[in-house]
Image: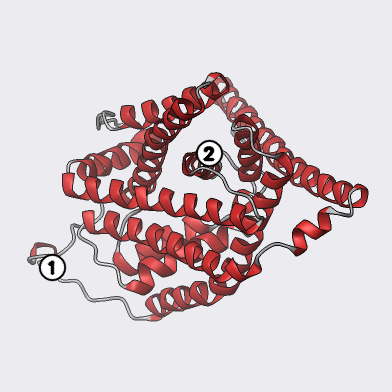
Amino acid sequence: MSITPFPTSLEQGKKERSRRLSYGLSLALRGLGYLVILAMFYWFFRRMTRNPADWEKLRDTSLTWVPVLFGLITCFAFLNGLVTRTLAKGFSISLSFLDWFGLAVANTFLNYLPLRTGPLFKAGYLKAKHGLDYAKFGSMFAASYVLLVGVSGVTGLGATAALASGAGDGTRLWFLVAFFAILAAVSFAFFFVPAFSSEKPALRFLVRVLRAWAQLRGQKRTVVTLVGITLLILGTLACRILLVFHMLGHRILIAQAVILGNCTIIGVFVSFMPGGLGTKEGLFIIASRILGLDLDVSIFAAALDRLVAMAWVMILGPPFSLALWSRVRKLKAAPAPVITPNDEFLPGSAPLEP
């Protein structure tokens, strides 16, 4: 019979309380997301029952622009795939079109499922097919988010400044100025996070991620390419927002569309809901109110973009996910290669994992 020492029990108790706190916070955030969605549905039906004339607004929606919106969403996924392709190339990994575009589509589709397994599927696929270890994938994941946050912050500040100078009164925009300034500062600071060494098992993975990140940020051409692709991603999102407002018969300024798009895409990082449901719409509506846009039209625009995007991903997501999954199954079913002791010294061979 073994007796557990008191310090070990104390540490286990702390870990258990920390786990329960994290789980409770996750449930609270998910509940908040569901409340936003329910509030939108409640507002929608309440509005329609009290104002039947609003149904005419929906009937007047120019659905002939839906194919164009589909095209912009496809372009958005294409550019996201190029980010993966560029980051993988930074680690000397060449991805085929099905690899990088298929992963972008599958990642979006799987993130709509309750468990949000998109990043896990992408990491597993790149590990199985191309031997990309999880630490390098973690650095890729972090790099794409850091650049997206930084470019969103800088372009958001520019759009807010342009809007304030044109409007003549930028008092209400100070919230957006502070928000985008924080985003830009956090991203800029991450570029200077040094790689360090540690013998602690808990920090071992973080050390490997930071080393891989240092390898990526040292490639100036890769960073410049990623910044350019990120600018195109945000530009495509702004075009989507301009289009959905146009479909509803309303025009907004390009600067307003940029601000709305940047606020919406940041919702991906703080959402615990599948596909960012609720969070993205909530940020969209808050930003719309700060910009002085009509609340009714903003909610219709957010819902319209979400519905078309969900239709797009439900059409393309399953076939691409199955195609990639079948590749992984074939790789697992294939016999393991015979490795001789000198294989690790062959030119172009990947170093063995420790």
Q: Which residue is drawn at 41% across and 65% down?
A: 125
- Residue 338 to residue 92: above or below: below
Label 1 to label 2: alpha-carbon separation: 50 Å
Q: Residue at x 30, y 66 (%)?
A: 130
Amino acid on which disc 1 is placed: Asp
Quarter of the picture holding the N terminus: top right
Q: Residue at x 39, y 32 (%)?
A: 158
Instruction: Quadrant for residue 99, please give it.
Output: bottom left
Q: What element carries label 1?
A: helix
Q: Where is residue 246 in the image (x, y as percent from the top left)?
A: 59, 55
Q: In this view, does 241 lie to the left or right of 32?
A: left
Q: Residues within 10 Å of mark 2 (few under 14, many from 20)?
A: many
Q: How many marks?
A: 2
Instruction: Quadrant for residue 102, please give it.
Output: bottom left
Mark before the other along the chain sequence, 1 or 2: 2
The answer to whether any part of residue 219 appears in the image is no
- Residue that label 1 marks: 343
- Residue 166 to residue 85: above or below: above
Q: Is mark 2 on a helix, strand or loop?
A: helix
The answer to whether any part of residue 69 appears in the image is yes
Q: Nearer the viewer, residue 114 or 163?
A: 163
Q: Which of 102 and 347 is in front in this view?
A: 102
Q: Where is residue 220 in the image (x, y as percent from the top left)?
A: 17, 44
Labelled disc at residue 263: 2
Q: Which residue is drawn at 76% across and 64% down?
A: 59
